[in-house]
Image (tube, helix red, strand yellow):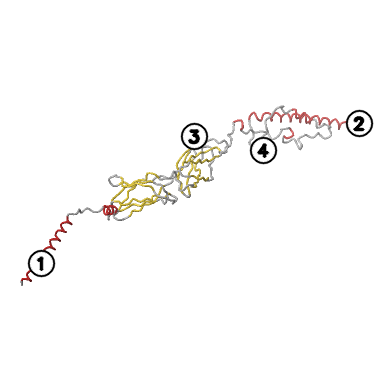
Amino acid sequence: MHARFIRGAVRSAAVAAAVTGTLTWASAANAQPSDPSPSASAAAADTPAPDAGSVEITTRDAAGDVLPGAAFLLLDSAGQEAGRGTTDAQGKLTFPDLAPGVYRLKETASGSPLHEVVADQDVIVTPGATTRLTITDSFKVAKVLLQAKDDKTGTLLPGATVNIGTGTSTLLTLTTGDKGTASGELPVSSRNTEFWVKQVKAPAGYDLYKPSKTFTAGPGAPVTVTVTNTKTATSPKPHLSDKPTHKPTGTSTPADTPGNGTGGAKPSTPGTGTPDADFSSTAAAVPVGDSSPPTPAGSLAHTGADAAPWIAAGAGLLVIAGAVTVVAVRRRTAAESEPDNNSQTN
């Protein structure tokens, strides 16, 4: 019985010793610092928040080519910078680890002298998602100088109006001013865009230039377009001295006077031997230097002073004709009486 008591005491002492050791280890463990190691802190810092989002940008031009080197700035809702960067060789740029919300995106440079920057725009970032944007930078406009010229002298002409366009669309209308020129801007869609120009209004005193002309223009480059016009043909105004006057178609002679017979010369009286030269005496009765034209056929007869020379000439002709007739009758009478005298003598 005594031995059994001793063995129980030894067992109790061993249990007590084991419990005491356990408590001592636990107390020592609780005394150690609870800060994590540096490597664990770094890993936690690199891990994004589970609700963070991102923005991915791809930049192109109007022709579809990617634009490397385009610079962007991202601002949060408070106007603070949330990120900045430039597009890579593929025209891409990403802003990661963004808290959800609304941001403001600004393009500060296009990375090309041929392209414009886009206007500022808002971007919404959603939790755990990537917002993808395609930015299209337009080409810079072409500078157009219009000239209208005289096709012969090259003088610049004001008041010419033309339409300029591409395809079926009219993009610009220009009218030359006092100096004969006009300028404007043309939107281009490629590095070499073809345009047409057509005149819709000619300068005063000139014919309209009807054909359409074509030309090419590049981004930001100046180009000169010239249209030429021909003066309108006009008839000269009639002068007072150019008024038509009534002129005789030929020289009027007594031979043209009605009633004088064929050929105009009065035949000699048969048997009198009077020569035709007597017509010259008749013609002498016509006033010299009288240029009054005869009355044209089919027109009204002139009255008044214009008829006086003709009346006088006609009266003279009648007097001379009567005198010639009297002389002829007397000669004929004398010739008929000579045979009677001869017969009486025999």
* Most foreground residue, 13 or 297: 13
**Pair 1/4: label in front:** 1
Distance from the alpha carbon under mark 1 to that under mark 4: 179 Å
At which x and y percent is residue 241? 61, 30
Question: Relative to 10, is 102 above or below?
Answer: above
Distance from the alpha carbon under mark 1 to that under mark 3: 127 Å
Secondary structure under tag 1 reads helix
Residue 10: which numbered mark, if any?
Answer: 1
Distance from the alpha carbon under mark 4 to that under mark 3: 61 Å
Q: Which residue is mark 3?
A: 179
Q: Which residue is mark 4?
A: 297
**Pair 1/3: label in front:** 1
Q: Which residue is mark 2?
A: 342
* Most foreground residue, 216 or 36: 36
Q: Residues within 10 Å of mark 4 (few under 14, many from 20)?
A: few
At which x and y percent is residue 308? 67, 29
Distance from the alpha carbon under mark 2 to that under mark 3: 114 Å
